[in-house]
Amino acid sequence: MIGVAFVGLLGAIVGSFLNVVIYRVPRGESVVAPRSRCPSCEAEVAPRDNVPVLSWVLLRARCRRCGDRISGRYPLVELLTAVVFAAVALARGVDTDLILQLPFAAVLLAVAAIDLEHRKIPNAITIPAAVWGVAGATVVQAGELPEMLVAGVAAFVALLLMALAYPGGMGMGDVKLAGVMGLYLGLSVLPAMAVAFLTGTVVGLGVIARAGLAARKSALPFGPFLAIGGLVGLLAGPELVDLYADRFL
């Protein structure tokens, strides 16, 4: 449990960085420089005001210099990342596989937030994630690398065919993200994709039921649903695959 708590703390710190990624990457800005600034007055955020979650609470959600309100998205991303990281460590164990699992979880959280706001999944995130997936697997999961490569290609091709058949339903960003999910999840990408389509369908029907047929004209971003499926695959994918095999094969 000490290891899980440490991973959760690490998640809060990574969540602070993800806030930078979520804000800057869609705008084509560097995530390295300049230092974090207030969007309103451009004042640099001092280290004491950059402590995950705690600083936002102590500052009462306002910039120390100009007093402008700080979005609640920042502590939410930090807290959510901490919870997800701790859940991954608890479900999969604190071992070297976290070298792959934690960055994958961070990628899912970042692309979900970006896709919700900007309706796109940047190559600047999915391409490095794919490279790290292959490189990391070569080091810590070499025996599973063939399965992961096959799963990545299969997931990519499957969504590519869907995107070509129904261009308005999903974009190439979703296709690339599916390929990345296969690289990290291997065979567990199957329940991950099932969860993604199930949640997407349920939410879509709910939106139509609430807003009427006019809601069909406003497409929902599919990235967040892929992220949900990816997290389910990460936390419980092998168990779901085994359960299906025991019951139906």
Image: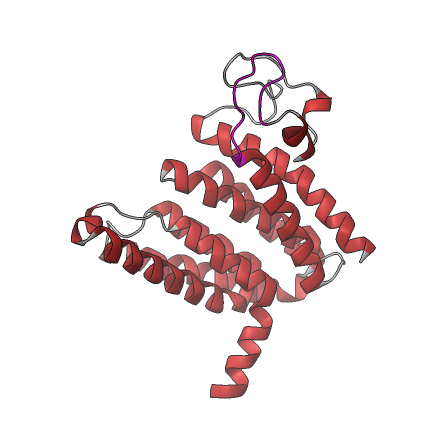
Give the farthest residue toward the left. Answer: 213
Front one among 210 and 217:
210
Q: Position of residue 21 (x, y in %)?
A: 54, 33
- The answer, for residue 249, to whether it is visible in the render is no
Q: Residue 133: within the magenta?
A: no
Say whether residue 70 is left or right of residue 214: right
| Position in image of residue 86 (x %, y %) | 69, 53
Q: Residue furthest front?
A: 60
Q: Is residue 114 above or below residue 226?
A: above
Residue 90, image quadrant: bottom right
Q: Would you place residue 170 above or below residue 245 in this image?
A: above
The answer to if 70 sits in the magenta stretch is yes
User: For the point 38% across and 65% down, which residue is it?
Assistant: 198
Could you tell me residue 177's position as x and y percent? 45, 50
Q: Considering depth in this image, is 165 or 150 the residue closer to the camera?
A: 165
Relative placement, left or right, of 167 versus 26 is left
Q: Position of residue 13 (x, y in %)?
A: 69, 37
Identify the residue at horizontal 44%, vertical 38% (top origin): 114
Region of the chain picked out in magenta, as a range: 61-73
